[in-house]
Image (tube, rainbow, N blue to C red):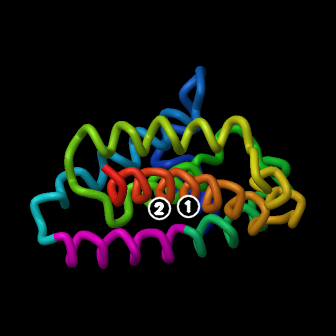
């Protein structure tokens, strides 16, 4: 079972890349679901929602299980960036321009951790690992949805 968690938490291995593993994890997440953009927007939203819920649960549980071996929120754990990226693109038009903007905004909020994002880490355990990136993804999505609404 640990092998499964290592694979999932590391974003199918992208977390082991030497430079900026979180960025690689977020990019891999976008590339993983990009082929689904040919689906109707409703089906795409449903698929992303299922991935978000499933991977969030796996990430929180797996982070708790692997903490003894890997430590709290280690660099190779990028499943949280994957979930955050999927939240950032949820409900957006499926164009590379919007998805690139979502990627950049998500990484901005994830790295700088403004507006309570850092506070989510203090929850601790696996949920703390996951929820800061969830909130960063929500913020990125809100910025883009607002931009779409007004422009």
Residue 135 on image: x %, y %: 64, 60
Q: Quadrant of residue 116?
A: bottom right
Residue 55 on image: x %, y %: 51, 68
Q: Main secondary structure of the magenta part?
A: helix
Q: What SS does tag 2 mark?
A: helix
**Residue located beneath label 1 in the image:** 138
Residue in the picture at 44% in, 40% down: 103
Number of other residues with Cα within 10 Å of mark 1, as a class: few under 14, some 14 to 19, many 20 or more: many
**Residue located beneath label 2 in the image:** 87
Is-magenta flag for residue 46?
A: yes
Residue in the picture at 53% in, 34% down: 23
The furthest residue to the front: 150
Q: Is residue 112 left or right of residue 41?
A: right
The magenta-colored residue range is 41-55
Q: Could you tell me which quadrant the N terminus lies in?
A: bottom right
Q: Quadrant of residue 20?
A: top right
């Amino acid at each position: 079972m640990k092998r499964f968690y290592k694979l999932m938490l590391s974003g199918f291995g992208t977390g082991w890349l030497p430079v900026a593993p979180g960025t690689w994890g977020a990019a891999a997440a976008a590339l993983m679901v990009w082929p689904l953009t040919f689906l109707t927007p409703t089906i795409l939203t449903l698929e992303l929602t299922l991935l978000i819920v499933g991977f969030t649960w796996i990430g929180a549980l797996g982070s708790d299980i692997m903490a003894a071996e890997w430590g709290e929120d280690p660099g190779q754990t990028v499943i949280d960036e994957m979930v955050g990226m999927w939240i950032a693109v949820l409900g957006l038009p499926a164009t590379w321009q919007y998805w690139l903007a979502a990627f950049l905004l998500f990484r901005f909020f994830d790295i700088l951790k403004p507006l309570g994002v850092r506070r989510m880490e203090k929850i601790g355990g696996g949920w703390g690992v996951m929820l800061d990136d969830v909130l960063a993804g929500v913020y990125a999505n809100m910025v883009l949805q607002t931009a779409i609404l007004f422009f």
